[in-house]
Image (cartoon, helix red, strand yellow):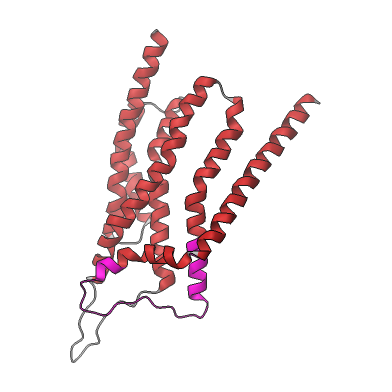
Amino acid sequence: MTNSNSFTSHFVELRSRLLKSIIFIFVIFIISYIFAEQIYNFLVEPYANAVKDDDNSRRLIFTALHETFIAYLKVAFFAAIFFGSPVLLIQIYKFIAPGLYKNEKKALLPYLIFTPILFLFGGLLVYYLIMPLAIKFFLSFESIGTNTSLPIQLEAKVNEYLSLIMRLIFAFGISFQLPILLNLLAKIGVVNSTYLKKTRRYVIVIIFTAAAILTPPDPITQIGLAIPLLLLYELSILTVKFTEKKDKVVEDA
């Protein structure tokens, strides 16, 4: 009977915390939709900066009556998830924290802090480096028409551009959680620094495969995702090794 009551109370608390997170994300969604045009202008800025010195008159077009409305909904949902994720993580931490020892809470806190920071770094990399380079790469395939051929010129659609940049931001942000994942696995004894070193060659293949799947079929975005992931993997080996030495010192003491 006690176990049943305990399970019920935990389930109620979990439902309460998830509900709070959903309400917060919904509120952010409403606010984001009100400022959807400003968020849209922010997301379009990499494209605008990449083509500002172009001789051609550039624009983003929509070919369906509802396309811009749907694009604004996507923008608002993107912002809601982006800004609401830290609150969701905090609620999850508060749910599991009572069942943890003091040292376990202390060990988990850095992961909670660095998760949104690494996601933000991934998003900033897309916004300030990957997207401008990718746009210039795609624009290089344009051609001026001749007497015997028609010109090839980009007429980017609002919905397609926004879907691309939001997809890349999420792909890079989630991929940048690699050090968090590997350090957590090391913490619970699933992997160690020696194992990570031995499997490096296989991880390189997996990383480039994942980059090819998560990004458009162009070398700029694929290499732009793969190289940071390789660096983060090497960083993970160092942090796991440091943690192992620290834990050994504590055990010896």
Q: Residue at x 39, y 55 (%)?
A: 169
Residue 85: % across, % down: 51, 47
Q: Quadrant of the C terminus?
A: top left
| Residue at image coords 75%, 34% | 8
The residue depicted at 34 percent of the width and 18 percent of the height is 245
Instruction: Check the image and name the residue furthest to the right.
Output: 1
Q: Position of residue 38 (x, y in %)?
A: 42, 65
Please, is residue 146 above or below residue 156 in the view?
A: below
243 versus 221 height, above or below: above
Residue 67 among those drawn in magenta: yes
217 vs 19: above or below: below
Q: Residue 186: which quarter of the image?
A: top left
The N terminus sits in image quarter: top right
Residue 6 is inside the magenta segment: no
Whether residue 236 is visible: yes
Judging depth in this view, the residue of 142 and 23 nearest the camera is 23
Nearer-the-camera pick, 38 or 248: 38
Q: Residue at x 31, y 63 (%)?
A: 46
Residue 75 x/y as whole percent: 47, 63
Residue 188: tell me if it is visible.
no
Q: Residue furthest top?
A: 253
Q: Residue furthest left?
A: 146
Image coordinates of residue 4 in percent, x first then y, are: 77, 30
Q: Could you say which is closer to the camera, residue 82 or residue 184?
A: 82
Q: How many dots with numbers?
A: 0
Q: Which residues are magenta?
A: 48-76
